Amino acid sequence: MKTQLDSEFSITAAIDPTLIPRRVLYTGAQMPAIGLGTFGSDHVSASEVAAAVEGAAAVGYRHFDCASVYGNEHEIGYALRGIQRKQLWITSKLWNDKHGENDVVPSCRQSLADLRLDYLDLYLVHWPFPNYHAPGCDVNSRSKHAKPYIHTEYMKTWRKMETLVDLGLVRHIGTSNMTIPKLNLLLADARIKPAANEMELHPHFQQPELFEFVRNNAMVPVGYCPIGSPGRPERDRTPEDSAPTDDPVIVRIAERLGVHPAVVCVKWAVQRGQVPIPFSSNRSHYLSNLEGVVSEPLTDENMREINAIDRTCRLIKGQVFLWKEGQSWEDLWDLNGEITAP
Ligand SMILES: NC(=O)c1ccc[n+]([C@@H]2O[C@H](COP(=O)([O-])OP(=O)(O)OC[C@H]3O[C@@H](n4cnc5c(N)ncnc54)[C@H](OP(=O)(O)O)[C@@H]3O)[C@@H](O)[C@H]2O)c1
């Protein structure tokens, strides 16, 4: 039976969802190779994000990257009401103050209730640090109870993530903001392996080692901030940051194709093999991002040129998760190949 949105699709949708490439997870499930991000970056309201979700669904998006901390799952659930569940890929995430053994299942159930769903396609541990910071806080905000990554503690959370699969509440579980040393420990101890790792990925932050590691371990790399997050909160801006959309290589390719540089970033991401989740609340922007994925691919030469402009420029540094005085954000990312000591 056709739903309201499916009927609207035949009138207004620009892209047939069946044309969108898919990534196969280790279970055989298929994830659309582009999703719409839903973080309003502390300045786009829940109702505006929900309107973008509804509009994006109407133009052909079927994958939505949600999280309880974005504070808009209730509104998004309403926006998605018309689409057949099996056509959708919905990800949500466990926030950092819900890592406790008694908090994981209720938190997931709350996301399901807000999103008006019986199950999630993918549920991620949002950050590997059980440190709460309030939405909208500034870069100097720290939790009094902040803790480093402690593997035995993370595994207690992960066991409950596995329980969610056993209960049929989620189809896949995964990680976000992890590093190779942390993933190595998790992969060794998990009964149900992570099916995806969400990580920052854009032309100025390509993370080639982690990207390959994730793929070689049967996880799908989901790329956040694929456009370089031009609207990110103040706390996530430093003077050293660069914008991939200003890069002369990206700008030149965009001019040749007659598209915004953002679209080139999205095309590159899908062609490289990650799943970008660009956010936009502007119909022409989210539509052009989707069009970019189903149109003529970038040339091999363009792909090589973009691969060569990596600047190792991490935008989401995570300062608010630091757990002791005098640390620098690099400590969160295990840069020397070992988990930073507590
Ligand atoms: N797991 C994590 O820890 C984590 C961290 C950060 C983000 N995320 C997820 O990743 C998603 C994406 O990241 P993000 O939102 O920070 O950054 P992003 O997707 O790289 O950038 C979004 C920005 O790009 C603009 N934009 C999008 N398409 C455009 C186009 N075609 N032309 C011009 N401008 C365009 C949007 O403005 P307009 O609205 O004006 O189009 C918006 O300001 C988030 O929404 C969230 O779902 C996850």
Image (cartoon, rainbow, N blue to C red):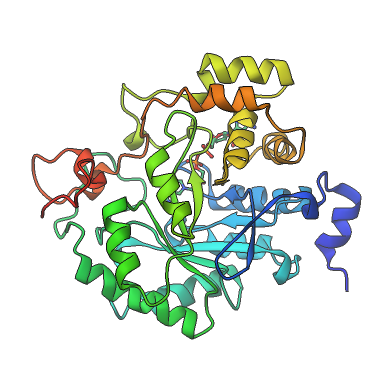
- Percent position of residue 103, x then y: 33, 76
Could you tell me if residue 233 is visible in this image?
yes
Classify 273 as above or below 171. Answer: above
From the viewer's perspective, is residue 103 above or below residue 20? below
Work out which residue is located at the far right of the displayed protein and give it.
Answer: 11
Looking at the image, residue 256 sits to the left or right of residue 331; the answer is: right
**What is the total number of numbered labels drawn onto the structure image?**
0
Locate the N terminus by quadrant: bottom right
Quarter the C terminus occupies: bottom left
Which image quadrant is residue 112 in?
bottom right
Q: Residue at x 67, y 34 (%)?
A: 285
Residue 49 location in percent, x, y?
A: 59, 49
**x, y percent for residue 12:** 86, 47
Q: Nearer the viewer, residue 68 or 273?
A: 273
The one of 338 and 170 positioned closer to us in this rendering: 338
> In the displayed image of the protein, which residue is found farthest to the bottom?
167
Residue 261 visible: no
Horizontal side, residue 61 vs residue 301: left or right:
right
The foreground one among 111 and 224 is: 224
Q: Nearer the viewer, residue 220 or 216?
A: 216
- Which residue does the image show at 25% across and 42% down from the upper left? 319
Q: Is the residue 40 above or below the residue 245 in the image? A: below
Residue 174 relative to residue 83: left or right:
left
Residue at (75%, 69%) from the top-left corner? 84
Residue at x-position 45% and y-position 73%? 108
Is 276 located above or below residue 150 in the figure?
A: above
* Image location (x, y in percent) of residue 331: 19, 43
